[in-house]
Amino acid sequence: MLFLYVRAVLANSSAVSNVPRARRLGRASIALSVTGIVISITAVVVAVCLFAISCSHYEYDGTCYKFKTYVGISGSCYAGVKSSSGYCYSKHCSGYVYRGSCYKYKKYVGYSGTCSGVRSGSYCYFTSCPGYAYDGKCYEYKTYVGRWGSCTDGLKLDDNYCYSAYCTYYPHAGSCYKYKEYVGSSGTCNGVRSSGYCYSISCSGHMYGGTCYLYRMYVGSYGDCSGVKASDGYCYYNDVADIYGDGTDTDYSSDYVEY
């Protein structure tokens, strides 16, 4: 009995002495937990800061991109990610880079030319070509010149079309023509007829004063001319009615008319 009593007293004493130790362990555990939370928060903050520092271009949806280009709500975004606000975020640019944006087309418009994209000096950058695209470039005019035809203002390509960024002669319906002659509704036109005018890339008639005429007739120095009279006695016409429809009895022989 005495042995059991002594053992119980010792056990109770040991339990009482372990209470402070348990409290110390509990406080240590709480401290470790708080430290872990602080370390985790610090790690997240550091990661965000490092990402912000490493992304020196454009950040979108947690990813860093090198280019940010406005393409509009309905525009296409090639090799990138399009945001709901109409911007295209991309890491690479296979087109033309200008001020942190990537454009698919670059067109020379001159300093006074119209630019519906982003202008830089005499060039205009586009995400989509408003004219005619060929081999990654954008052109304002596309004119069929044929296999043997020449291309004055632009570049003639394998499809026998002349692509040009500007037109120094007569633009019409997206093409550039060298000649524009009034032929009326019944006059001969070897090009494209529109509202009584004939647009052509080559003169199939007679050149005078930089203009192409379909007909010419020799009237002499004092002869009447209802067309354009030259100093050498020739009269130039674009409508054959101008030759015979003068309301007089004059009957010019067709031998005098050159076609």
Image (cartoon, rainbow, N blue to C red):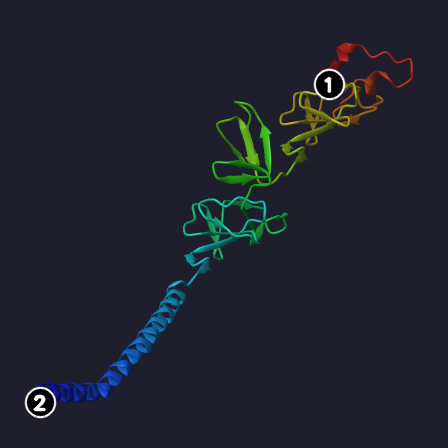
**Where on the picture, by quarter, is residue 138?**
top right
Name the residue rendered at 65%, 36% in the picture.
169
Pointer 2 local density, CA inside 10 Å: few below 14, some 14–19, many at least 20: few
Above or below 66: residue 54: below
Q: Amino acid at mark 2?
A: Leu
Taking depth in this image into account, of 116 and 242 the one nearest to the observer is: 116
Name the quadrant of the N terminus.
bottom left
Q: Determine whether the residue tagged by mark 1 lies in a helix, strand or loop.
A: loop
Residue reaching furthest to the left:
3
Q: For marks 1 and 2, give the one nearer the viewer.
A: 2
Q: Residues within 10 Å of mark 1 (few under 14, many from 20)?
A: some
Of the numbered discs in the image, which one, if any, rests on residue 2?
2
The quarter of the image holding the C terminus is top right
Q: CA separation, marks 1 and 2? A: 140 Å
Whether residue 133 sits left or right of residue 56 in the image: it is right
Identify which amino acid the numbered label 1 is placed on: Thr
Residue 6 coordinates in the image, percent (x, y): 11, 89
Q: Are marks 1 and 2 in contact (CB under 8 Å)?
A: no
Mark 1 = which residue? 188
**First in sequence: mark 1 or mark 2?**
2
- Residue 10 in the image: x percent, y percent? 13, 88
Q: Is residue 14 left or right of residue 109?
A: left
**Residue 243 in the image: above or below residue 165:** above
Total numbered circles: 2
Q: Is residue 43 visible?
A: yes
Expressed as whole percent of the image width and height from the top left, the position of residue 66 reads: 43, 56
Q: Nearer the viewer, residue 226 or 14?
A: 14
